[in-house]
Image (spheres, rainbow, N blue to C red):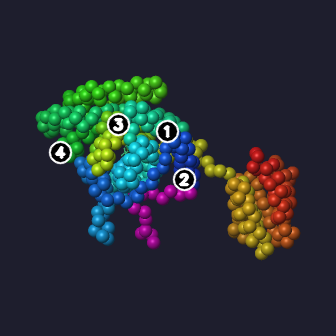
Amino acid sequence: MNNLKNLRGTVDLLPDQLIKWQNVEKILLEQLFRASIKEIRTPILEMTELFKRGIGEGTDVVSKEMYTFLDKGERSCTLRPEGTASVARAFIQNGMSSSPLQKLWYMGPMFRYERPQAGRQRQFHQLGVEFIGYESVRSDVEIIALAWDILRKLGIKELNLEINSLGDFNDRSNFQKSFSKWLEINKNSLDVDSQNRINKNPLRILDSKNIQTKKILESAPKLFNFLSEKSLERYLKLKNQLEVLKIPYIENFNLVRGLDYYSHTAFEITSGALGSQATVCGGGRYDNLIKQMGGKDTPAIGFAIGLERLILLAGNDLDVSRRTDIYIVNQGLIAEPFAIDLSRKLRSYDLLVELDLSGASFSKQFKKANKMNSKSIVVIGDKEAANKEFVIRLFDKESSGNKEEIIPFDSDIKLEQWLNNNLLLN
Ligand code: HAM
């Protein structure tokens, strides 16, 4: 049994940690609901071909990081490394293009075979948002503002928004011609990783973190200078509208993102409070993806937030769980079944009720209720059960005694009066 451990890069989330996850998820769901975005759930397992075609074979994600295997029917399957390709497939396959304006979100596990470190796992979680069918700059602005506001709502500080434009397909192919010539001349001065990317994914070289490569890249042609007038105008509008909304941004002309489907707007939000894995949110426009996957020509934009990184950043006040409303102390042959029955009734009032199942002495159960910091306590022993009643009182020391009441099992009116006066209306 000792040898049975979870796989490297995966983690167990234990009840105490999940308090924060659940509080964060609750806030996320509220924000998404208010922004009128609908949930979509796609399978975790997909055909490998989907990601090869959607994300691009030259990307690190597809060429190095996918969990791919043959199933018993000899089909190549992959645990999803991200959600955008799956959402695009579901949009096409389910005829969702008949109402082509869709604002969608998803949340769940993703899988990438990366070297695990703080904020980087092999099974991690994302919240993703995709606006499908939206072409205007306003949709770029709404997407960015939404990601920004979600992070702010969770109390995250030291946020930096970086933006860039990758232009359209023509802009990029014009740039690539000129960049290839430059690479031909300078390839020997680049780091090995970047050299390997020359044939597979040259744009990613722009994103290199290698200091020497960064320095040499200063003399390389800039994608930004290859933007058509239309692409440039779009980018300037985006900047202008972000300024109107007072969302501060930094232009990073080397930001190309790691997935092939992007065009025009690309953005990332980082936080200085995270270590080396500082990007908490990444996104951008993918106007060609749906057509390229066999759907109609459909513009789209989206982002994904890494939930592990979000949890690391979110305020500690979100670590707090709801206080138990009532702790039921019970003991005795007649009392115990009554206690179960009473717990069901009390829970129907939307109260958080803990039923003690230990069978331990009353004093031990009192101690447990105290430790749990329950707001109130119900006591049922065989004596109370025989009289068809129970004792209820507030647990706070200063109020103990004066709010104690004996309530008959069948007196809902008396029970509701007590609950209203002491728990529900407070
Ligand atoms: P991405 O930049 O690959 O974009 O991932 C988005 C976020 O997921 C990252 O910023 C990071 O917070 C988190 N993340 C990625 N890999 C890991 C990992 N190994 N461990 C922990 N967190 C990680 C996408 O996935 C795109 N689908 C985003 C998108 C949606 N673009 C348009 N629509």
| Amino acid found under the numbered disc labelled 1 | Leu
Could you say whether the residue bearing mark 3 is in a helix, strand or loop? Answer: strand
Q: Which residue is mark 2?
A: 17
Tell me residue 109's x, y (percent).
43, 54
The main secondary structure of the magenta stretch is loop
As measured in the structure, the alpha-carbon distance from the residue carrying label 2 to the one carrying label 3 is 33 Å
Give amino acid for label 3. Ala
Q: Is disc 2 surrounded by few (<14), some (14 to 19) or many (20+) residues within 10 Å?
A: few
Indicate which disc, 3 or 1, sits on the residue closer to the N terminus. 1
Measured in 3D between alpha carbons, the distance from the residue under mark 2 to the one under mark 4, in whole angstroms, is: 44 Å
Is the C terminus in the top left, top right, bottom left or bottom right quadrant?
A: top right
Q: Residue at x 45, y 57 (%)?
A: 11
Q: Position of residue 206 (x, y in %)?
A: 26, 36
Q: Alpha carbon of mark 3 to alpha carbon of mark 1: how far?
A: 18 Å
Marking on residue 266: 3
Q: Which residues are magenta?
A: 1-15
* Lateral position of residue 39 relative to residue 386, left or right: left
Q: Nearer the observer, disc 2 or disc 3?
A: 3
First-in-chain label (4 vs 1): 1
For disc 1, the marked residue is: 151
Secondary structure of residue under mark 2: helix
Other-residue count near label 4 (Cα within 10 Å), few / some / many at <14 / 14–19 / ≥20: few
Magenta region includes residue 308: no
